[in-house]
Amino acid sequence: MSDTVVFIPAWNEEENLPAVLDELKAELPDAHVVVVDDGSTDGTAAVAREHGAEVVSLGSNRGLPIGIATGYRWAFDHGYAFCGRVDADGQHRAADLSRLLALVRAGACDVAVGSRFVSGDGYEPYRYRPEGVRRLGTALLRRAMRRVLGRPFADATSGLYAVNAAALPVLAKQFATEAPEVEALIRLSDAGLRVEEVPVDMAPRAGGESKLRGRKALKVVFTVVATLAAARFLASRRQG
């Protein structure tokens, strides 16, 4: 049995999943792959099984926060030492996940998060420039993350993660907000776990349309900021 599982939250992603799964199989052949099917109405579950993934079905569309927690809970319940997460839309490269997992395996950190906004060897600054409401949201979020975590964090909404067993029980609990990645970072910080932001490149969606557009994207921005404000308030109450 592999000590590593990779999960993919998916809702109506039959168009993009085959390439994502094939790339994972080629790059991480020994990893167990699980697709968390969030009540898809297309062939997402069938496509996942055809490409060798196990499917955990939520039965109905319950939303990304539940899908993410379900993936981590599955990894925790099944005793995996390491867990990766990629999105189903083809934006994350399996080679980058492999690099993140290697850092966690080596003990460099408990959690490695793939970032579009930090630079490093081979990764130029400002290679990814959000536009419109996303640009506003990114600026607000960076400032809020620095205040809440006490450290800069450039890409708090990234869905590309590699974690060890110590982080799984922290991430497996149900999320209370619609900003699960931000809430996850707060939890990990409160638990004293080591989180490293690692530069990666992310591609545009391979197909279909993003679920975060227009008013929905704006709503997410304000949800994220509210999540951070609430975390800061609760932290100050505990200290007091």
Image: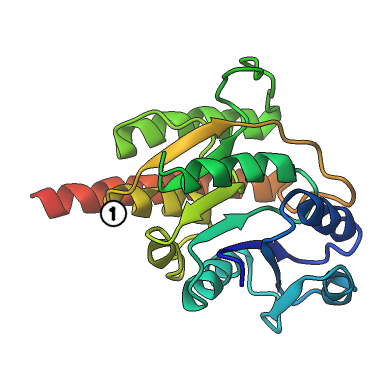
**Amino acid under label 1?**
Ala
Residue 134 visible from this viewpoint = yes
The residue wearing badge 1 is 191
Query: Which residue is depicted at the point 76% across and 53% down?
Result: 24
- Decide: is 166 above or below 189: below
Q: Is residue 188 left or right of residue 103?
A: left
- Mark 1 nearby-residue class (10 Å; few <14, some 14–19, many ≥20): few
- In this view, the residue farthest toward the left is 240
Query: Which residue is depicted at the point 63% across and 68% down?
Result: 63
Return the x and y of residue 73 as percentages of the image width and height.
50, 73
- Decide: is 130 above or below 194: above
Which SS class for mark 1? loop
Return the x and y of residue 210 as percentages of the image width and height.
78, 49
Residue 157 visible from this viewpoint = no
Q: Is residue 205 left or right of residue 177?
A: right
Give the image quarter of residue 137: top right
Work out whether residue 197 or residue 149 is closer to the camera in this orientation and state it: 197
Quadrant housing the N terminus: bottom right
Return the x and y of residue 69 as percentages of the image width and height.
52, 68
Return the x and y of residue 192 as percentages of the image width and height.
27, 48
Q: Is residue 174 left or right of residue 20?
A: left
Work out whether residue 185 or residue 24 is closer to the camera in this orientation and state it: 24
Query: Which residue is depicted at the point 53% across and 70% down?
Result: 75
Work out whether residue 76 or residue 205 is closer to the camera in this orientation and state it: 76
- Decide: is 113 above or below 147: below
Circle count: 1
Work out whether residue 202 or residue 4 is closer to the camera in this orientation and state it: 4
Give the image quarter of residue 153: top left
